[in-house]
Amino acid sequence: MSLLELRDVAVTYRSAAGDVPAVRGVSLSLAEGEALGVAGESGSGKSTLAMSLLRLLPRDALVSGEILLDGEDVLTMSWGRLRAVRWASASLIFQGAQHALNPVRRIGDQIAEPLRVHGMATGAAARRRTAELLEQVGLPAWRAGGYPHELSGGQRQRVMIAMALACSPRLIVADEPTTALDVMIQAQVLSLIRSLVAEHGIGLIMISHDLSVLAATCDRLAVMYAGRVVESGPSREVFRDARHPYGRALAEAFPTVGDPASRLAPRGLGGDPPDPAHLPTGCSFHPRCPVALVSCASEPVELWPASRTEEGRIESAEVSHTAACVHVRVHQEAR
């Protein structure tokens, strides 16, 4: 049984102007000790999907489908059961630790709060556990007495990771954990996350717009566009040989180190993601797609097998790489 399984998850925001679909029929799974990256531009639905995993969305969000954590549907849990699951079984590293941490409470008190809430430690035991967690994320124990403004951005992010680890959860969801950090601190935080996942067998879902970060950190990668997964597979395979034009554009948007041509003229993608309230028909990506066919504007799409064989043909069985593109389907049918 998977640690986490999403079955046809959809999230719709209700507004005075009408319903706005932010996530549309996402199905994913995560095994214990596995890292899954979810990529996409702003507005693709990835953060909404992350918040839905622990029912942290606002009241105007309607969530359907199934979110199975150890076989138990998060969407049908009572509030008491949900409170017991949060932090203890699954925790979240929020985007932007500066805003997630309470500026008037000491670091140690904030790390120890999940321990006290779940009855795992109090008093001296909580202080010892807090010191252990700080050292585990590369911070000295005396930092527990400080306040968030006394730490650098990278140190605050490490505090958020320590809080997420406090109750030894089996699942961690990291929503853009390194977006506001410089490249050196980003590398340190990513290395820390990778080592913690490997050492403790934690299941990790990492949300980011940066395919290169996810390829270096995660085992598998899911690319989202307009609320749907348009490509999924082994992270390095998706990054190096994306089969969906959108996944390819994301990978090519980053300059190649040591290649002056790509640094001076990085390839990107024109236009903007569609308004979720007014999505195009057919393939949602077709208005921006450089290889779109006339049929892309009307025909529905689904995820088709997209892994290549050594001869460059599409594999037919037991494929782990899929893409929702008509060109992938055409190649599959032409085998």
Image (cartoon, rainbow, N blue to C red):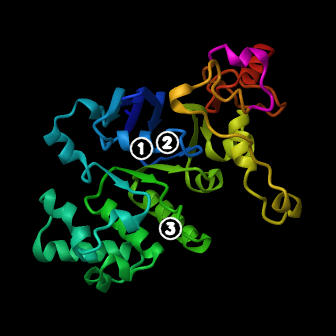
Could you classify mark 1 by the number of other residues whose Cα lies within 10 Å: few (under 14), some (14-19), or many (20 or more)?
Answer: many
Using the numbered discs, state the Cα–Cα distance from disc 1 to disc 3 in whole angstroms: 20 Å
**Residue pushed farthest front?**
16
Using the numbered discs, state the Cα–Cα distance from disc 2 to disc 1 in whole angstroms: 6 Å
Residue identifier under label 1? 50
Residue 46, label in figure: 2
C-beta proximity under 8 Å, tags 2 and 3: no
At a point 66% along the width and 13% down the height, the residue shown is 299
Residue 52 in the image, given as x and y percentages of width and height:
36, 39
Q: In the picture shown, does residue 17 fall above or below 131?
A: above
Residue 153 in the image, given as x and y percentages of width and height:
46, 73
At a point 76% along the width and 13% down the height, the residue shown is 333
Where, by quadrant of the figure, is residue 62 drawn? top left
Residue 126 in the image, given as x and y percentages of width and height:
17, 71
Residue identifier under label 3? 189
At a point 63% along the width and 26% down the height, the residue shown is 284
Where, by quadrant of the figure, is residue 243 drawn? top right
C-beta proximity under 8 Å, tags 2 and 1: yes
Query: Taking the image as drawn, is residue 7 in sight?
Result: no
Element type at marker 3?
A: helix
- Range of residues picked out in magenta: 289-300
- Asked if the stretch drawn in magenta spans residue 295, the answer is yes
